[in-house]
Image (spheres, rainbow, N blue to C red):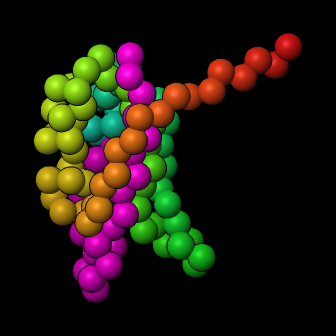
Amino acid sequence: MNQYLVTGYDYTDEGALERRMAVRPHHLDNAKLYKQKGNYITGGAILDDSGKMIGSAMVLQFENEDELEAWKKGEPYISQKIWETVDVKPFKLATISTE
């Protein structure tokens, strides 16, 4: 599978955090669905210096670009205009042995 690092930064208008919090349950449900399908590896919120959520970072994997594009179309933080910018880069998760 091809792995991707997804970085999304939220809009910065006055209602941005409230919108994010309203859409967040749908985003997490979507992540859970992709986790069950084996596409979601890890992710979390990007925080500012005060601990406020300002974006997200995720590592995802898909068999092909069509699956990646389908995820983009179905991702609530994209479709509901939570992320102002989204950057998707090819990524290779390191395998670290404890031996």
Image location (x, y in percent) of residue 10: 33, 67
Tell whether position 21 is magenta.
yes
**Can residue 56 be seen in the rendering of this structure?**
yes
- The magenta segment is 1-28
Task: Work out whether residue 69 or residue 79 is closer to the camera in this orientation and state it.
Answer: 69
> In the image, what residue occupies the spot 25% across and 54% down?
77
In the image, farthest residue toward the right? 99
Is residue 46 rendered to the left or right of residue 16? Answer: right
Looking at the rendered image, the quarter that the N terminus falls into is top left
Tell whether position 79 is magenta.
no
Looking at the rendered image, the quarter that the C terminus falls into is top right
- Residue 67 appears in which quarter of the rendering? top left
**Can residue 20 be seen in the rendering of this structure?**
no
Task: Work out whether residue 2 or residue 33 is closer to the camera in this orientation and state it.
Answer: 2
> Looking at the picture, does residue 13 appear above or below residue 84?
below
> Looking at the picture, does residue 30 appear above or below residue 81?
above
Image location (x, y in percent) of residue 60: 39, 32
Task: Work out whether residue 1 or residue 57 is closer to the camera in this orientation and state it.
Answer: 1
Is residue 97 rendered to the left or right of residue 48? Answer: right
> Looking at the picture, does residue 9 appear above or below residue 34?
below
Image location (x, y in percent) of residue 5: 43, 41
- Residue 37 appears in which quarter of the rendering? top left
> In the image, what residue occupies the spot 26% across and 66% down?
84
